[in-house]
Image: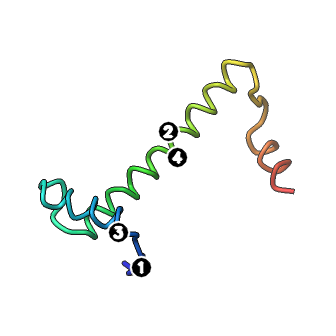
Amino acid sequence: MSTISIPFNSELEDFINQQIKLGNADSKAELVRRAVRMLKEEEEMNELMKSYSEYKKGEVLSGDLKILVDEFSN
């Protein structure tokens, strides 16, 4: 695990401290890790929704998976 030092403006720092006081996290690090995990999950959901939208529009690939991978790898 690595450590990252991130400067926050006073508004965000106040929000972080408020969340800890409310019991929504035990520490600043835990709160930031949770926020990053939530962002990661949101990005993954956006990718799934994009894929589903493309599927509904008929924008899908078909054929031999190995050939498709080879074509996109070059």
Along the polypeptide, which appears first: circle 4 or circle 3?
3
Quarter of the figure with the N terminus: bottom left
Q: Residues within 10 Å of mark 4 (few under 14, many from 20)?
A: few
Rendering quarter of residue 67:
top right
- Residue tagged by mark 3? 10
Along the polypeptide, which appears first: circle 3 or circle 1?
1
Q: Is residue 4 left or right of residue 61?
A: left
Amino acid at the residue labelled 2: Met
Callout 1: SS: loop
> Residues under labels 3 and 1: Cα distance?
19 Å
- Residue tagged by mark 1? 4
- Residue tagged by mark 2? 45
Q: Is residue 4 left or right of residue 23?
A: right
> Residues under labels 4 and 1: Cα distance?
21 Å
- Residue tagged by mark 4? 43
Along the polypeptide, which appears first: circle 4 or circle 1?
1
Q: Is residue 27 left or right of residue 35?
A: left
- Determine the residue positioned at 35% across, 68% down: 10
Whether pointer 4 and pointer 1 mark residues with C-beta atoms closer than 8 Å, the reply is no
> Residues under labels 4 and 2: Cα distance?
5 Å
Q: Residues within 10 Å of mark 1 (few under 14, many from 20)?
A: few
In this rendering, the answer to whether 7 lies above or below 32 is below
The image's mark for residue 27 is none
> Residues under labels 2 and 1: Cα distance?
26 Å
Q: Nearer the viewer, residue 21 or 40?
A: 21
Q: How is the image coloured?
A: rainbow
